[in-house]
Amino acid sequence: MILRTLIFLGLFFGNMLNASSYPESDDPIKVTIQDWTGQHFSTHVAAGLLKEMGYNVEIVVSDAITQHPAIASGNINLSTEVWTNNVGDLYDGLVDKGDIVVVGELGLSPKEGWIYPPYMEERCPGLPNYKALYECAQAFGSAETFPKGRLITYPASWGTRSRDMVASIEMPFEPIPGGSEGAMVAELKSALAAEEPVIMMFWQPHWIFAAYDFNWVEWNPTDGKCIEESQKKDTACGFEQAKVQKVVSKGFADKWPAAYKMFNAMKLTNADENAAILEVDEKGRKVEEVAAEWIANNKNVWKNWMN
């Protein structure tokens, strides 16, 4: 009887300690949201799980580049997706100084580059090799860019990687920044419907590759890292492929240790994001609703992240 009572008391007080171990602070954890649907989904999953743990969470708008000084200054505390091949000039130095803490990789297997519809290979023989674009740039041209080809790049706030490479390898294309992810997808769908020319910088995971056929421009293989900013025409390697890192602000682990432990364990896959993006972009559902549904359907997964 005494032993059973001691066991009961141990469990009771142990549960009390676990229940009171977080949140460790009432201060809001400021989580950045940016401007593409996949990142919206991972942000709302992370925010939803932090709220499940009792944390006060605030969503803060930024973009792929401006998030870094904001994290370093503590104005943002957590980012679910830093694509390491599009970080600007400040990121590596801020990580080295300890002002941004890399928690680990999110779990995605990303790819970035230029895509085009298969019918363009008839109009531009030699594709998918990038060198074919020198000979048939006009096949991708528009009234505004002719005789140069028209290349849709990432929105301006995402950086200038395609523009910089076009200039360095002297490719006869005019880079045109996409207005947003939604605008880029709309242009792809419109071009496909009319079989019009289109070539665009794009990424996966993304639902569009499950719905439509696209080919990727192919570049020269390289040993080690592809140095995008110093390429030459004959040896161009295209784009350095990213890792997708989770990061937090300096001192995060000390202030919110249970949140840090959960975020460190958090993983999402291409399949998770592709399914979510399809629900939001094609079916018109709210990303908050889709993220909440993922949380409700995957308790067996994320419960382990909190242990």
Image (cartoon, grey):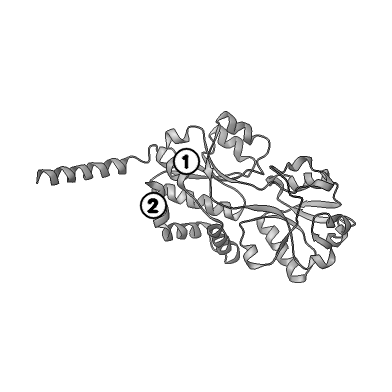
* Most distant residue in the left direction: 1
- Judged left or right of residue 173, residue 203 is left
Mark earlier in primary sequence (1, 2)? 1
Q: Position of residue 99 (x, y in %)?
A: 55, 31
Regarding mark 2 in the picture, which secondary structure is present there?
A: helix
Front one among 80 and 133: 133
Amino acid type shown at disc 1 = Ile
Regarding mark 1 in the picture, which secondary structure is present there?
A: strand
Residue at x-position 71% and y-position 63%: 214
- Judged left or right of residue 167, residue 205 is left
Judging by the rendered image, the residue that carries numbered circle 2 is 303
Amino acid type shown at disc 2 = Lys
* Most distant residue in the bottom direction: 194
From what the image shows, is residue 64 above or below residue 194?
Answer: above
Residue at x-position 84% and y-position 53%: 173
Question: Crowding near pointer 2: few (<14 within 10 Å), some, many (20+)?
Answer: few
Judging by the rendered image, the residue that carries numbered circle 1 is 29
